[in-house]
Amino acid sequence: MLKIYGSRLCSDCVRCVEELTAAGVSFEYMDFGEDLLALKTFLTIRDGNPLFDSVREAGKIGIPCIVKEDGEITLSWDEFL
């Protein structure tokens, strides 16, 4: 099952959840506002993955962050629609 790290305060995260739900995609949503362990886990992923280099350099957060079942990480949910 996909894991999505994000925040309900992020419009991209809200849109991601809405579109995946409408498409019938199963996922677990890890909301930073409700779960500090989710935030800690996400920061570990983000700070150790070169996928986020340009995100960090731009001063952005890098959410929604999608972790596939095989552990691959992506910032795009379009491939699951």
Image: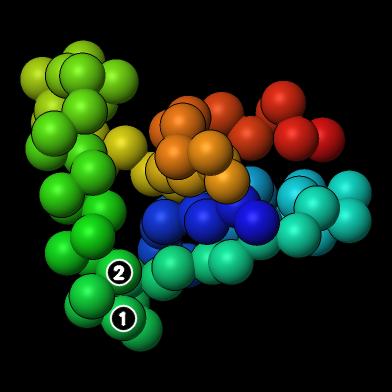
Could you tell me if residue 75 is visible in this image? no
Residue located 23% across and 75% down the image: 37
Instruction: Assign a secondary structure to mark 2.
Output: helix
Q: Which mark is residue 35?
A: 1
Q: Secondary structure at mark 1?
A: loop
- Which x, y percent locates residue 28? 59, 66
Say what amino acid the circle numbered 1 marks: Asp
Q: Residue furthest bottom?
A: 34
Return the x and y of residue 21 as percentages of the image width and height: 80, 59
Q: Can residue 28 be seen from the camera position used here?
A: yes
In 3D space, how far apart are the residues under numbered discs 2 and 1 (Cα atoms)? 5 Å
Give residue 71's quadrant in the image. Answer: top left
Task: Name the residue rendered at 29%, 20% in the picture.
Answer: 51
Q: Position of residue 5 (x, y in %)?
A: 42, 56
Residue at 23% across / 60% down in the picture?
41
Where the C terminus falls, by quadrant?
Answer: top right
List the residue tagged with mark 2. 38
| Quarter of image, res 30 | bottom left
Instruction: Say which amino acid is labelled 2.
Output: Ala
Mark 2 and 1 residues: CB-CB less than 8 Å, in contact? yes
| Residue 31 horizontal side relative to residue 55, left or right | right
Quarter placement of the N terminus: bottom right
The residue lying at 14 percent from left, 28 percent from top is 56
Q: Residue furthest right?
A: 23
